[in-house]
Amino acid sequence: MNCHVRNMVCLSQRSQAKFRIILPILILIAVEFVHPTMSCKNENCTQLLHRSLKLTRLMSKRTAELLETYKASQGDSADLICDMQMDNVPVSTISGQTMSERILSVYTHLKEFLPHMKTVMEQQKDLNPPTNPVVEGLHSMITHVRHIALRVNCILQILQPNIPIPEPAERPTGVPPAQNIFQQKAYGCIVLSRLQELLSQAVQEQKSLKGKMCRKRTKNGS
């Protein structure tokens, strides 16, 4: 009886520890789902930057974890397929001289990656059972990258008010019409790798705005 009680207590403590780790993530994700079409005017500058940075940092971590799950599902060929070169996948490098140009580069790349992520998800459904963690992870990631792009768009509207924001193409460019299984596996790994690099850079770009963007807006009387 005592052994059983101790086991139940240990299980309860482990469950509580996991819940404490997961709860902040669930709260953040819940907030994002409540405002899937948020208006930029609903948040002040400091709030917007804080929440965008927090979500981007979280998704950078989740993408790194998803990439490891993806590699593990590919078996011994993981290193080989992930080292392949593919020109049809968007680059992860942020460009631009000014704050506005670099944040626009982040926004453009985020939008460019979305259709590629969807393509990888559809390919993985064909290669693996629909309930596999890679497909589930990609489905969730697509939603959250859309939310990050939406918030970055709002940041752009603060940095360059009254200037139209160019939208990238809705469909992935340069994806071969037919890929064999090996090419599909390599494509998925490269998309996730570059996405993780992009999100990591997006975190740094948004951190660099702290103390600059909102102060600039105040000086402009907004």
Image (cartoon, rainbow, N blue to C red):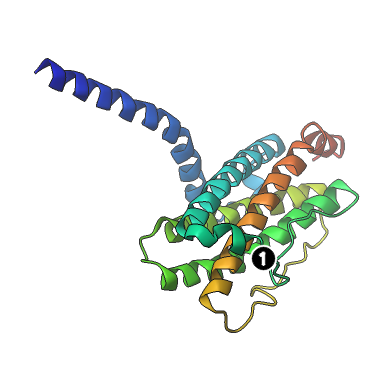
Percent position (x, y) of residue 88?
A: 70, 72
For this rendering, which residue is in front, 93 or 107?
93
Q: Can residue 134 be seen in this view?
A: yes
Q: From this viewpoint, which residue is outermost toward the right? A: 97
Q: Residue furthest top?
A: 2
Residue type, label 1: Met
Q: Residue 195: name its quadrant.
A: bottom right
Quick check: can you spot residue 35? no
Position of residue 204 measured from the top left corner of the image (x, y, whole percent): 74, 40
In the picture, which quadrant includes the N terminus?
top left
For the C terminus, which image quadrant? top right
Residue at 52% in and 46% down: 65
Rendered view: 9 above or below 24 = above
Question: Label 1's element?
Answer: loop
From what the image shows, is residue 177 above or below residue 192? below
Asked if 30 appears above or below 188 in the picture, the reply is above
- Is 148 left or right of 125, judged from the image as shown? right
Look at 87% across and 35% down and name the residue there.
219
Q: In this view, does 179 lie to the left or right of 49?
A: left
Q: Which one is nearer the viewer's eye here, 179 or 25?
A: 179
Q: Badge 1 is on which residue? A: 84
